[in-house]
Every structure is written in structure tokens, then in C-alpha cells.
Amino acid sequence: MPRARKGAARKQAKNRWFKDAKGNRGARRNHYAKVKEAVIRGGVYATRDRKRVKREYRSLWIIRLNAAAKARGLTYSRLINGLKIANISINRKMLSEMAIHDVKGFDQIVETVKKTLEAAGKAIAAKVASKAAAAV
């Protein structure tokens, strides 16, 4: 009896690989060994880049917020610190969108942050002054 060599199942398995390699050029689409390499490598890049996209978007939002905050007399770090002190919980993506599309709303948030930072600065100055007076 002749040796069985997987037959139709082998062809189906190879076809799955070739289907995944669709869009490649040359041997990366036609030669089975190269196809497997290309598909595996593509999967590795896809996995890595799913994380990278998130990182790049967050960086973009921060850049936009820094520019918008500087146009209003703040820095990005002071804006975020002021938001935390004022208990305003809004994420960077929404803040960035507000800075672009809802300028009035963003201006109100910036004014609130400025008032909060000013009040916090006065409170800190008062604490420092009382400690200095106690030390003398």
C-alpha cells in the first residue's frame, strides 16, 4: 500500500497560508517557504504595531495640548496638574479634540485651571510663610 502524504488537507493548509500572503510581491506570494516567512513576520509586526499605534496617538494628543496650552499662557504639564487639582477628569484625547473643535469649551477649562493653580499657589505660599515664621 502506498504511503499517504496528507493529500487534500495539505493543499487546504497551503491555501490558507497563500491566502494570508495576499498582497505581497514576488516570491513572498508564490513560494510556499517564503510565504510562510512573510506571513509570520507580518503577524509579528501587526502585534507590535497595535501597541505602537496607541502610543503614537497619545503622543499626538499631548503635542496638540501643549501647543493649545502655550497659546493660552500655560504649559502642558501645568495644564494637566491644574486639571488634577481641580478634579476635572477628562482624557487627553477629548481635551485635544476640544482644543481643535470646541475652542470656547477649552478656553473655559483653561480659565478654571488657571484659577485653580493660582489658588493652589497662594495656599502653598501661605504654608511656606507660616513655616518660615515658625522657624524664626
Image (spheres, helix red, strand yellow):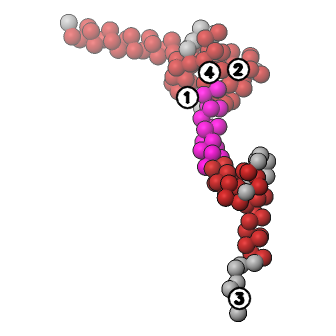
Q: Residue 20 in the image: state x and y as whole percent.
A: 75, 56
Asked whether 35 or 114 is in front, the reply is: 35
Q: Nearer the viewer, mark 3 or mark 4?
A: 3
Q: Which residues are magenta?
A: 44-60
Mark 4 falls on what kind of element? Answer: helix
Of the residues under marks 1 and 4, which one precedes in the sequence? 4
Marks 1 and 2, Cα distance to the nearest angstrom?
19 Å
Name the residue tied to disc 4.
Answer: 63
Asked whether 119 or 100 is in front, the reply is: 100
Of the residues under marks 1 and 3, which one precedes in the sequence? 3
Q: Which residue is at 60% across, 28% downward?
A: 59
- Label 2: how many Cα within 10 Å (few below 14, some 14–19, many 20+): some
The reply to whether residue 37 is visible in this rendering is yes
Q: Nearer the viewer, mark 1 or mark 3?
A: 3
Of the residues under marks 4 and 2, which one precedes in the sequence? 4
Labels 1 & 3 near each other (Cβ < 8 A): no
Q: Nearer the viewer, mark 1 or mark 2?
A: 2
Query: The residue under label 3 is which amino acid type?
Result: Pro
Mark 2 falls on what kind of element? Answer: helix
Q: Nearer the viewer, mark 3 or mark 2?
A: 3
Of the residues under marks 1 and 2, which one precedes in the sequence? 1
Query: The residue under label 4 is which amino acid type?
Result: Ile
Marks 3 and 2, Cα distance to the nearest angstrom?
73 Å
Quarter of the image that includes the N terminus: bottom right
Label the magenta part by its dominant secondary structure: helix
Quarter of the image that includes the C terminus: top left
The image shows residue 10, relative to residue 2, as above or below, that is above
Mark 3 falls on what kind of element? Answer: loop
Q: Is residue 46 magenta?
A: yes
Asked whether 73 or 39 is in front, the reply is: 39
Name the residue tied to disc 1.
Answer: 87
